[in-house]
Image: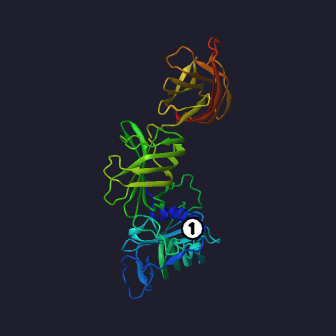
Amino acid sequence: MFAFITKANLLLMTIKLLFKGLLFAFITLGLMSCDNEPLEGEFPMQDNPLEIELGELRAQVDGSNYVSSNGTAVIDQNGFMVLTAVNLSGNILTLAAENIGVGAFDIGAGNTGGTQNAAVFTLFNDGANPYISQLVLGGSGQMTITAYDTSAMTISGTFSFIAVRPGIDVQGNPIIGADGLPVIQTISIESGVFNQIPYENTDTGDGGDDPDPDPIDSFSAKVNDVFFLVDSLSVSRVVIADIPLIRIIAINSVGAKIRVDVPELLGVGNYEMVQISNGTELIGLYNSNTGGENLTSNPGSINITEFNTVTGVLTASFQFTGTDPLNTDPAVVEVSMGEFTVNYEPDPLNPNTPFTCEIDDVFFNPLLNVTAVETIVEGNNVILISATSGTEQVELLFPSTLIVGTYAMSENTSDGDEVVGSYRPDVGGATTFTSNPGELILTAIDLTTGQLEGAFTFTASDPTDVDPAVYEVALGAFRLVIE
């Protein structure tokens, strides 16, 4: 399954990061030199920008007419609006404001009345360095909503703003003025007006009672210390040589790409990336879309903080240095401050449910080698969970008649109605160490749907007292489907 995020939602997420990054980067610089750089790009001319059609947005951008006939807006359940309008040249004008409704809004980025309010202007050929109405750098902005039609789901209003950005040369380096400070480039947007722009709600429209709203993916990163402004994001679960992985591809407005491949068998933790992959390994990749080669992680790392293979959620931060693995392209790129939360469709036939625990403080990860079956022991229906990792095996046995609750474990199964945990350090060995004591917590059990969730912990020892070894099985958790 491929999950695509709308331009409005992406701009919302990247705008928030841009605000934080630019504010932090430049507030310590004090006074800076400014330069009203002539705006590049073609702007369709109209005799009167205020003669506006339904669904249009128009404005004067440094004296040139800006016309968009395909404006769209997204308003979330908290009333936060992001309105996006693209003109024929591919330039993007974005307005964002909290607590939307008829009235006036300060859209200067960083204003105390609306922490996410902002106006952004992005040139088609310079998507990584947009102009933003940053108050701390001399930007400002005002917007008035004149009509907010919740029946027709349209919004109308007027706006004007001054937006700024740090000057960057073709190599991506800051432009330094004669005073030794970074040059701040400025544009002025005046006489802005939008007429009945259609909007979408990101909630259900029924008061937010949808128990399972569509999740929104997020992705952000810097490339050579410049924010990578995502234009499209795709997330897919692919299987190569029977090994599933999650492939995340982020593309900006000029076609530059950041790709991260994450094997689904990985769990929460820190991992090193490889430089050359057979399609099944953890790797980061960058391509500038300017004729160069794919630059892959050398080195690179990822910190996975959430990986739910049942619901299909992956959250991680990453960074890597990208170089050509074949050494034909001398380019080197630094991808830093990478973060994403993505949603994907898990395999319905094999939920790859995590079964995890620690054995003497060592992480036990059975990967796909987990089963949950209903069987019969001593004439009683029981559920047997079996997880194998290498030569190690952990098993849980309990009556299928149990309900949600907490249960003490026994050392042996004599009548078939006990709860028993067991650990075998060597599947081929003779000794099975069983729970003495132990505890099983069932949080979900449904024999009709097969849903089975819970947690466990036990001390494993030899019930025959032949082997003196004792193992601590702790932090156990499972989320399975009974076969």
Q: State the image quarter where residue 401 is shown.
A: top right
Question: Does residue 441 lie above or below 37 as drawn?
Answer: above
Mark 1 residue element: helix
Visual colour scheme: rainbow
Who is closer to the viewer here, 250 or 288?
Answer: 288
Looking at the image, is 205 positioned above or below residue 167?
A: above
Q: Which amino acid does label 1 sit on?
A: Phe
Question: How dense is the environment of label 1, judged by Cα within 10 Å: few (below 14), some, or many (20 and up)?
Answer: some
- Number of marks in the image? 1
Residue 282, horizontal then vertical, whole percent = 43, 43
* Closest to the observer, 101 or 289: 289
Q: Percent position (x, y) of residue 94?
A: 49, 71
Above or below, 238 relative to 6: above
181 relative to 257 in the view: left or right: right
* Residue 451 at x, y percent in the picture: 55, 37
Which is nearer the eye, 384 or 293?
A: 293
Residue lying at the far bottom of the rendered structure: 47
Query: Can residue 82 be seen here?
Result: yes
Q: Where is residue 198 in the image (x, y as percent from the top left)?
A: 47, 71
| Residue 156 visible in image | no
Which residue lies under the disc numbered 1? 26
**For residue 133, side relative to residue 86 (left or right):** right
User: Residue 475 sits in which quadrant?
Assistant: top right
Residue located at (59% from left, 72% from top): 136
